[in-house]
Image (tube, rainbow, N blue to C red):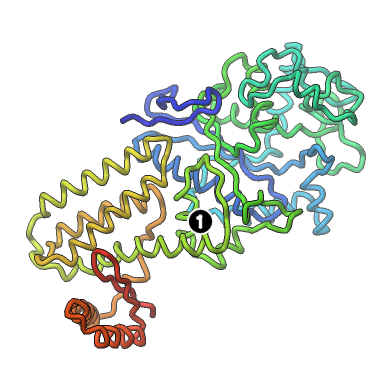
Amino acid sequence: MTLQVYNYLTRRKEEFVPQHPGLVSLYVCGPTVYDHAHLGHALGYVSYDVIVRYLRYLGYRVMYVQNITDVGHILDSGEDRILKGAQRERVEPMELVETYTRSYFDDMDGLGVGRPSISPRASGHIPEQIEIVKALLAQGHAYEVDGSVYFDVASWPAYGELSGRKVDDLLEGARVQVRDEKRSPVDFALWKRAEPEHILRWPSPWGWGYPGWHVECSAMAKRYLGETIDIHGGGIENIFPHNEDEKVQSEAANGVPFARYWILWGTLNVEGVKMSKSLGNFVTIKDALARYRPEALRFFILTSHYRATVNYTDDSLTAADKGLQRLLDAVAAVRRAIPRAPDADAPADPAVLDSLADYKAQFLASMDNDFDTGGAIGVLFNMARESNTLLHGADPASRATLEAVDALYRELGADILGIIPETLDQERSLGLEEPLIDLLVRTRQDLRAAKQWALADGLRDQLTELGITLRDGPDGTTWQADR
């Protein structure tokens, strides 16, 4: 099966074929750095971390560009988030963005999210943005009014192709309080004149001002990836107006398609309501990492499809952490068993190798189906059940067999999904205690089989006092050292 991706431009799944064999150009809208990153950022950037990991796993060289918006853009409400944040904290705007840019990357590192190939800043690409505005003016797709420049939506009949919005509908629902200088309420700003009190401003052919929000992505994508890119990523909530306006201005300025595949992630709700600071349900990544391990947050995100709406609750995160623990217990049991396995020089069991090959094929089939990480995780749980059975079988597995199982856990669960750490807490050595613990666990199983419940429960309680937690499952009992 070849990789199939859902393309929001066509609203259907398509086979992924990059422009240039073996090379993928990928641009993802990055954060506006005016405050600490939140779980909505985690949802998007963990999802794209896995997408990039998988593309590289398939053998592609991925040029991954993710911008940093460090130039304040005016929202419909008239709010400039960066300037408002600087006023809130009584610092210079660029001091604010330095603080929260570092904070953002610290959070991504904490979540195990790989760094992009390039993280360009909007403030460092003002000349490129001005060149796009100049090109649009020269081609008749933009007009200048008193130092501001707007895109003339009427000049582009295909406006709305990506978002599905129709210009007539937009005009009908437009606000009454539209700036008089715009020819149409649906026209959008490419460059805005700066009032004297506006701190972030630059010289331009139209006077001192600053770029519109959308033009920065067009400029940086072109600068590092070319006029046409393979994949454009971002949140579905920004498909209009941000992505739509990006697409329109890029194609009008360059005369070629902007992005071939639009792969957009879903939204995050908190207790069933879209996360919002104004509603008081805002959860930062730092707060979440203080309560949960990073692999649990990744696991929680990846059990849902990247295009889905994900609902965060404390209960759902706790359940995700417990679910991940069951998987990690199985992995740790295999790793603990490897050094004690008999037949150190014996080859791996052919039947087990065949089973592992089947699990790998199922896992890759899920990932090839529009990056279905939930299905891929389900395959790992099926594999965990079989590895637990293997460890509790009458004939002990050879070292080579167990090493093959562990290698596949590392390949799929660690390298691609990033939910299995390199070293697990359950792996820490207990010296000569480990064989004794295994013996006690097997003795307890024998007592349970003989219906000696009181003795079995007493043995479990004594192990608990020693810091050993037992987990009973349909395929046997696993243990974890809690100290």
Total numbered badges shown on the rendered structure: 1
331 or 393, which lies in front?
Answer: 393
> With 395 as the anchor, is 431 left or right in this view?
right
Q: In the image, 430: left or right of 206?
A: left
Q: Which residue is mark 1?
A: 111
Q: Residue at (12%, 50%) from the top-left corner?
A: 351
In front of the other: 187 or 85: 187
Nearer to me, 19 or 311: 311
The correct choice, above or below, for 473 with respect to 79 in the image is below
Residue 137 at what x, y percent from top left?
77, 16
Q: Residues within 10 Å of mark 1 (few under 14, many from 20)?
A: many
- What residue is at 57 percent from the left and 41 percent from the top? 266
Left or right relative to 295: residue 381: left
Horizontal relation, residue 171 to residue 221: left or right = right
x then y, percent, for residue 33: 69, 49
**Residue 327 position (above or below residue 269):** below
For the residue marked with disc 1, what is the amino acid?
A: Leu
Tell me the quarter of the image containing the N terminus. Answer: top left
Q: Quadrant of residue 365?
A: top left
Q: Quadrant of residue 391?
A: bottom left
Residue 348: percent from the left, percent from the top? 12, 54
Disc 1, SS: loop
Q: At 76% across and 27% down in the image, what residue appears?
A: 190
Which of the 4 image quarters holds residue 256? top right
**Rendered-image quadrant of the C terminus:** bottom left
User: Measured along the vertical axis of the image, is residue 142 above or below residue 418?
Assistant: above
Q: Position of residue 191 (x, y in %)?
A: 79, 28
Where 215 falls versus 353 (above or below)? above
